Image: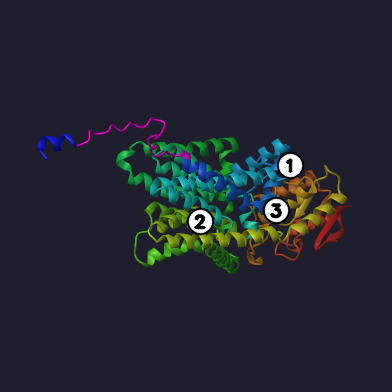
Amino acid sequence: MSAAQHVAAVPAPVAVPRPRASAEPPSPGPRRGLPFWAGLLPVLTALALVTRLPSFLRPLWNPDEGFLATQARMLTHGAVLYRTVVDRKPPLLPWLYEACFRAFGDGSLLPLKGLAVAAQLVTAVLLASLARRRWGERAGRTAGVLYLLVSIGLEPEDAQAATFEVFAVPWTAAAMWCADRGRWGRAGLATAAALLTKQTGGAVLAPVLLMLWTTRPAARGGTAALALGVTLPVAAVAWACGPARLLFWCVTGSGSYASVEGTVAASAARAVANAGVLTTSCAGLLAPVCLLLLARRRVAPPELWLWLIASAVAVTTGFHFFGHYYLQLIPPLTLLATAALRALPDAARRVAGALCALSCAAFLTAGLLATPPELPHSLRVADAVRARTAPADPVLIWGMHPEQYWFAGRPPAGRFLTAGLLTNYSGGRDASAVGEAYGVPGGWPVLRRELRARPPALVVDDSRGRPYAVARVPTLRAFLRGGYARVGSVEGAVLYARR
């Protein structure tokens, strides 16, 4: 065969038609934000609702909620914070309770319980965002879910109550979130809000300052912005409440309360017990962190360690070690565990998740079945008070459960809602540091004036043998002898009516 014939035998190339644009669209680039949050937010919302379900099943969980409820009711009826109703806490949460009572009525804490769910959800979202920015989307999902799983890992009366720590932790997470992005003014505002929710919330300033220090070349104006963000809200609140009163009730007037005199054994036992409960509930977080520490491997950046250390110092402040104090350890611990899990095999992440889920199920079940220890007694005392007084009659309840005022629907006879403010009794303190001499400075003259000006229609001695019993309080004992007679008792609480 000739060469010409061979060339001619080669078939001509066949033209392949191009597909239409709609037949095979180009693969989209990575979409930012929407898929991550669209998938995670419903999960976090459901977890926040489920984990705090027990909080809706009881009228309240601990005396702090009762104090806030009674205080807020007084505020809605014209009382003035730090003047005609007093507490050792900053004003943001009492004002929040007051706003809810004005909007929805003062007969239920359901709106506050709903806001507590939102606070935990916001905290989880901020932690997820922090982890995602630093370590990727999987870490973000891990942080958000793990936080909510362990957020109820304390006794139900500590974890389920809508009190100070629950509303402070979102602000601490927000401060870290803003600092992580170099938004120093906003970080200062969030720090101030945490401080004005509970004094120990200001501990987050330590890691924020460390982050500012390590980014000095890029944040020359950050120091001024952070300082203004912290100081301006505090100054505004001081102006609204009165600087001297705010300083006294939130700082200088609590010297006896913060003393360890008479409470060393009880506080040490409570510290060990609550630390043990938190360690058990957070085993899924602690295990990966400890594993890497034992292997001498870097776990997380220093600001997260400082956040945990500062929170631990805050827990020890006052040496009372109540269970709800430990809640502010959970956000930094969650991020440390998330960072550690990145360096471990996938099996470790599954084990950690399983441990946290198991802990959550156990504490959720406990919350669903438990009843606050003193709740039945407080309800019975309130029933007795209601039966013997009219709605406008002032009442003095000498005890540590101010929720009895709220349940009874009767106004307190003075600004001091617990015997602890006037005797320094708290958290199992023994008689060596309890009495009139240890109360809030200047408290007894004020109470005597209030009792003379507006004598209570009923006095309830609910001390039940504790160190602040009426027999150990000369002023109150003399007041009862001068114009009151015993008219009954309820489970050890003694009722006195005016003669």
- Asked if marks 1 and 2 touch (Cβ < 8 Å), the reply is no
Look at label 2 and name its amino acid. Answer: Leu
Within 10 Å of disc 3 (Cα), the crowding (few <14, some 14-19, many 20+) is many
Q: Nearer the viewer, residue 288 or 179?
A: 288
Q: Which x, y percent locates residue 309?
A: 44, 57
Residue under label 3: 418
> What whole-number distance in Å separates the C-alpha atoms at marks 1 and 3?
20 Å
Within 10 Å of disc 1 (Cα), the crowding (few <14, some 14-19, many 20+) is some
Question: Is 119 rendered above or below residue 156?
Answer: above
Dot 2 lies on which element?
A: helix
Q: Main secondary structure of the magenta part?
A: loop
Please report whichever mark, 1 or 3, sits nearer to the chain's N-terminal start: 1
Please report whichever mark, 1 or 2, sits nearer to the chain's N-terminal start: 1
Residue under label 2: 329
Q: Which residues are magenta?
A: 10-34
Look at label 3 and name its amino acid. Answer: Thr
Q: Nearer the viewer, residue 381 or 468?
A: 381
Tell me: 16 left or right of 406. left
Look at label 1 and name its amino acid. Answer: Asp
Q: Nearer the viewer, residue 37 or 156?
A: 37
> What whole-number distance in Å separates the C-alpha atoms at marks 3 and 2?
28 Å
Please give the name of the residue rendered at 83% of the width and 52% of the height, measured from the top-left corner: 385
Asked whether residue 476 is in view, the answer is: yes
Mark 3 or mark 2, which is nearer to you? 2
Dot 1 lies on which element?
A: loop
Give the colouring mode of the picture: rainbow
Asked whether residue 82 is in view, the answer is: no
Residue under label 1: 106
Dot 3 lies on which element?
A: loop
